[in-house]
Image (cartoon, rainbow, N blue to C red):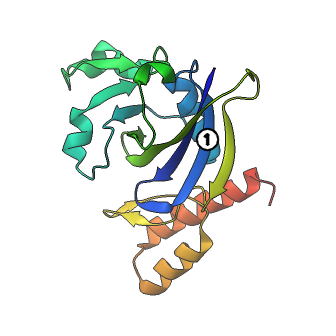
Amino acid sequence: MVVYKFEVALDHDMATYRHIEILGNQTLDVLHKIIFDAFDRYDEHLYSFYLTRKVTKSLQKRYNSTEYTASEGLSDDFLFLDRKKKYSASKTKIDHLDLCEKDKLYYLFDFGDCWWHEITLLSMMETDQKKGYPKIVKKAGFSSALTTIDGNCKIGDDLFILKRKVIDGKFSIPCLAAKIAGLWVSLTRKGI
């Protein structure tokens, strides 16, 4: 059985990433769930994976690549927006992606706020273990940086960035209030 080790980084902050190990017989939906947990998310949204194999900052190239999406994204309600063939993340096993080391995927979480992640395959190794996967093996950076991306409010738990942005005057009062409320929720959920 093959274990895949991925680095999943926030697209707008590559210093914030997680290393995740997952079995080849597990699905992209399972990968989504461990990414969701790894970044301390608490509110489910639609998601898609885009298999580009190479680095690209072009959203058009990402959208034009093979897409694996949440089952809800395959419904007729969403198909009228995009006639492109999409595949089910819950039916697609990691082994079936035919990945090579250093291949890239992009993961879009929350189609409204557009949390893009760059996923890199770091390694593949054989194992006899079938239990304990997927698992998070390394965390770097905060769960969700408090930044404005194209003017959008993002809620997370990075106090340093919040302080810097407030000092620089880059937050509106409503956005700042939403971020503080989100930070409070994150901290109380962690028992801090």
Q: Residue 184's image quarter?
A: bottom right
**Mark 1 surroundings within 10 Å by alpha-carbon count, few (fewer than 14), some (14 through 19), many (20 or more):** many
Does 109 sit left or right of 2 as displayed?
A: left
Q: Residue 192's image quarter?
A: bottom right
Residue 31 visible in the current orientation: yes
Does 124 sit left or right of 89 as displayed?
A: right
Callout 1: helix, strand or loop?
strand
Front residue of 2 and 186: 2
Which residue is at 57% across, 59% downward? Answer: 156
Which residue is at 58% across, 18% downward? Answer: 25
Residue 128 higher or lower than 64, as above or below: above
Residue 66 in the image: state x and y as whole percent: 29, 27
Front residue of 58 and 42: 58
Residue 30 higher or lower than 21, as above or below: above
Front residue of 173 and 94: 94
The disc labelled 1 sits on which kind of residue? Ile
Q: Residue 86's image quarter?
A: top left
Which residue is at 76% across, 53% downward? Answer: 190
Does 35 sit left or right of 121 as displayed?
A: right
Residue 42 visible in the current orientation: no
Residue picked out by circle 1: 20
Residue 170 in the image: state x and y as whole percent: 39, 77
Residue 127 higher or lower than 181, as above or below: above
Residue 179 in the image: state x and y as whole percent: 54, 63
